[in-house]
Structures are given as structure tokens and as C-alpha cells.
Image: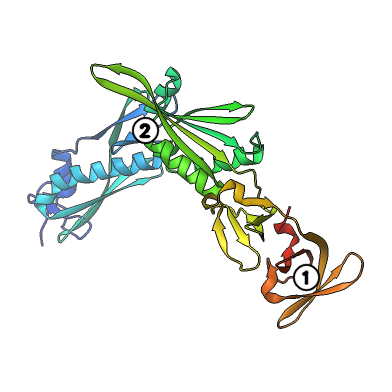
Amino acid sequence: MTKCPICNREKTPSLPFIEGICIECYLAKKPIEPVRLKIKRCKVCGAVFLKGRWEPDPSERVEALAAKEAEKALKKRFGPYGFEAMVNWRGDKFKAQLFGNEGSYSMPIEVIIEEEKTICPTCLYRRSGSYEAKIQIRSNSGSVDKRTFDEVMKIISSFSYDVRSSVVSIDELKEGFDINLMDKASAKIIASAIADKLGGEVKTTYKLISEKGGEKRTRLSISLRLYSKKGGELVELNGEPALVVRRSGEPAKVILLPSRREIKLSKIEPNALKPFSGEAHEATLQAVLPDKVIVLLEDFSTEEVPISSVFGGTDMGKYLLVESENGRFLIKREMVL
């Protein structure tokens, strides 16, 4: 039976030996130096530079990266003795686990995170007031309402930190608003997403800002003119009755009522959409049959509508009976303005 010549304890699966002595006596003779991790932190917004990019409030990522650095140090130290290492953050400290054919051993490990205070590119741009790209949001109606502004902000916030942090400032104007960004690539990505989800015309231009040593600096301007059509609005497309639909997280679409075909609003020319010229009546769904539904109108008369012409399901409740030269259609009331 193997015993440690220093402390006289026996070798067990929870007390492996290294260099002929137990691991605790080995560590007493050759302590583990603290593992140091150097990071950059923005002194303005608190973002941290990790693995080539800036991330907001990444405390968990910092701890995970620190644990990986500690694992590398332990593997270098104990790998030659046949041990693997795993380090985890437990509450307020790092804990290491060594395991191999000779057994396993748990111990605390000190990790020192050294922060270099600096300013991230986003905050630097905001301080300087400079930007490389501008998205000009306008509307065919002449103004942009708060609902559209909120939708645009939601689209921007859905992107990764790399993209959304490129926004330097937002200027609210009478005719719309401008989004100033610190890089052209992010501006193109954001403008494309806005046009896709809300529908609109995109025009791109470049303006020469400066020229030094033969190197030209340009500013990208993206003009995005949104359609004034709102979700839930009845319209006509090429003479067919249609409904503008804006589902959360999806591109704005126009549903052609006769064919039920859906077309992205961004794919339709603005002047192709016309005001709805038919009639619409408030109705209440009374009965659902295998091939049709029966609705009660406000004058207490009843009408029958084929199931194929019902939009929004067949639950009992309020609907709008839409009549045009192309037929009659029943649309759930909450889908229509």
C-alpha cells in the first residue's frame, strides 16, 4: 500500500500521487501561481473586448473565458502526470477539478482578472459625433408615426451587439428620423431588414467627405422611404381586394383575398396599391358548417360565406364582411383597422 513519505497518508482515488508524494504535499511544495486574464473594458458603457469583438455587460462570458485560461494553465502543469483539468465558477470563486487514471482531486484556484480601461469604438464615435453611414427614414405620407419608429427600434435591437452597437445617434426630424452609424456594412444590414419587414424603397448614395494622401473617405447615405400602408388596412392590388398584414417578427405582407396569395410589401411598387373601393360590413359569426359559415349583420340579416373565403379562423365573434367585384370575404375583426 502506497503512502506519502511526507504526511504518511495512503494513496486513494480522492488523493492521487504526483512525483511519489500525495497531491496536497506536492501543492504545498510547488504552489499553483494565480492565473491572470487581461481584458479591455470600456470606461463609458462597460462593454468588454472578448475574442476580437466588443460585448455589452458580458460578466458570464468573462468568467467562462477566465475558467478556460485556468484550464489551460492546469493542463500545462498537470498534463504530463496524466491529469485532465476542468474549472468552473462557483458563486464567488473558481474551483478546479483534476482527474485521471490515478484518481481525482478538487481545489480552489485563484484567477486574477486585470482590466485595461479604454473607450470602445461606439462610445468613441458618439463622443466625436462622427459617423460613416446614415439611414434616412421617411414615409410616403409625409411623416413617420411613433408606431413605425418603435418598429424600427425593435428591428435594430434584434441584431447582434456588433451590428446594433454601430448606431451612433438617432436624429428625430419633422419629416422622419435619421439613424447615424459608425460603419457602412451595419447600415446596409439594418436598412435591408427594415425595408424587408416594413416595406419601402431603398436608394443608396455615397458622398466624399475627405481626401488625404490619395485615400478617399466617403459617407454612405441610405434613403428608405416607407409605405404609408399600415397593418390591417384594406387595399386593392391590381384591382384585387387585399389586406396589409404585419405580423410580429415577419416582413410586412399583402394578402390577396381571392387567391390568398401573400406578397412581401417590399416587392410591390407603392403606386400599385390603391384604396379599397368595395364595401365592408360589421358581422358576427353565428355558425360553422362543413363548407361555409353563417354570419349575422348589423341589420339582423344573415349571410353565407364559403370557408375558403374566411380569414383569421372560424371562432365565434366579430368579423368584417368585405364585398367587392371579386367576391365576398370574411375577415376576423382584430385583423382589420
- Crowding at dot 2, Cα within 10 Å, few <14 / some 14-19 / many 20+, comes out as many
Residue at the extreme right of the image, as rendered? 299
Residue at the extreme left of the image, as rendered? 19
Residue at the extreme bottom of the image, as rendered? 290
Q: What is the x, y in percent for residue 124? A: 40, 22
Residue at 65% in and 68% down: 258
Q: Is residue 121 above or below residue 299?
A: above
Q: What is the x, y in percent for residue 245? A: 63, 55
Q: In this rendered view, identify the residue nearer to me: 70 or 127.
A: 127
Q: In this rendered view, identify the residue nearer to me: 95 or 153.
A: 153
Q: What is the x, y in percent for residue 308? A: 67, 74
Q: Is residue 161 above or below residue 295?
A: above
Q: What is the x, y in percent for residue 158? A: 49, 45
Circle 2 — which element? strand
Three-letter code, disc 2: Val
**Visible residue check, residue 7:** no
Circle 1 — which element? loop
- Crowding at dot 1, Cα within 10 Å, few <14 / some 14-19 / many 20+, comes out as few
Q: Is residue 244 above or below residue 113?
A: below
Q: Is residue 316 above or below residue 109?
A: below
Q: Nearer the viewer, mark 1 or mark 2?
A: 1
- Residue labelled with disc 1: 316
- Left of 42 or right of it: where is 158? right
Residue at 79% in and 60% down: 280
**Visible residue check, residue 183:** yes
Label ID, residue 48: 2
